[in-house]
Image (cartoon, helix red, strand yellow):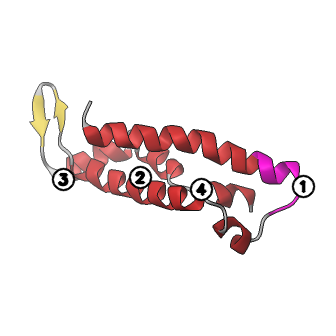
Amino acid sequence: MSAWKFIIHMVLLLGYIIDPYHIAWYIGRNRVPELAEITEEPSVIFELVADILLTINIIICFLTAYEDEMKPVKELRLIAYNYAKGYLLFDLLATIPGYFVMM
């Protein structure tokens, strides 16, 4: 596994732990947090870095060739189409910050 994929997987794994915690913390208190209150959380820096890395990953996926019938496909239009019909929706959903779910 490449280093980039490892970093993305670790970011997603930590996001799967941190986001439900934030949602449960504020829903358990029956209130919606203010934006200023959210930015005081120490994990906000992690979430910002994670969102930046996931956005960079989307750009990289749009530019990375793939194999079709054992032949590399390098045409950007076909790469974009292949990515859009595959993982693009999931990658876009992964970049939504957890605190938007609470608002």
To which residue does mark 2 refer? 54
Q: CA distance from mark 4 to mark 3?
A: 36 Å
Q: CA distance from mark 3 to mark 1?
A: 47 Å
Q: Left or right: where does residue 29 sit relative to residue 59?
A: right
Task: Find numbered disc 3 in the image and state the secondary structure of the residue it sits on.
Answer: helix
Task: Find numbered disc 2 in the image and state the secondary structure of the residue it sits on.
Answer: helix
Residue occupying the point 55% across, 45% down: 15
Residue found farthest to the top? 70
Q: Amino acid at mark 3?
A: Leu
Q: CA distance from mark 1 to mark 2?
A: 30 Å
* Of labels 2 and 3, the one closer to you: 2
Task: Find numbered disc 4 in the image and state the secondary structure of the residue it sits on.
Answer: loop
Q: Please give the range of residues in magenta.
A: 24-32
Label 4 vs 2, first from the N-terminus = 4
Q: Are marks 1 and 4 in contact (CB under 8 Å)?
A: no
Label 4 vs 3, first from the N-terminus = 4
The image's mark for residue 76 is 3
Q: Position of residue 36 (x, y in %)?
A: 70, 74
Q: Quadrant of residue 10?
A: top left
The image's mark for residue 30 is 1
Q: Position of residue 96 (x, y in %)?
A: 56, 56
Label 4 neighbour load within 10 Å: few <14, some 14-19, many 20+:
some
The image's mark for residue 43 is 4
Label 2 neighbour load within 10 Å: few <14, some 14-19, many 20+:
many
Q: Amino acid at mark 4?
A: Ser
Q: Position of residue 55 (x, y in %)?
A: 39, 57
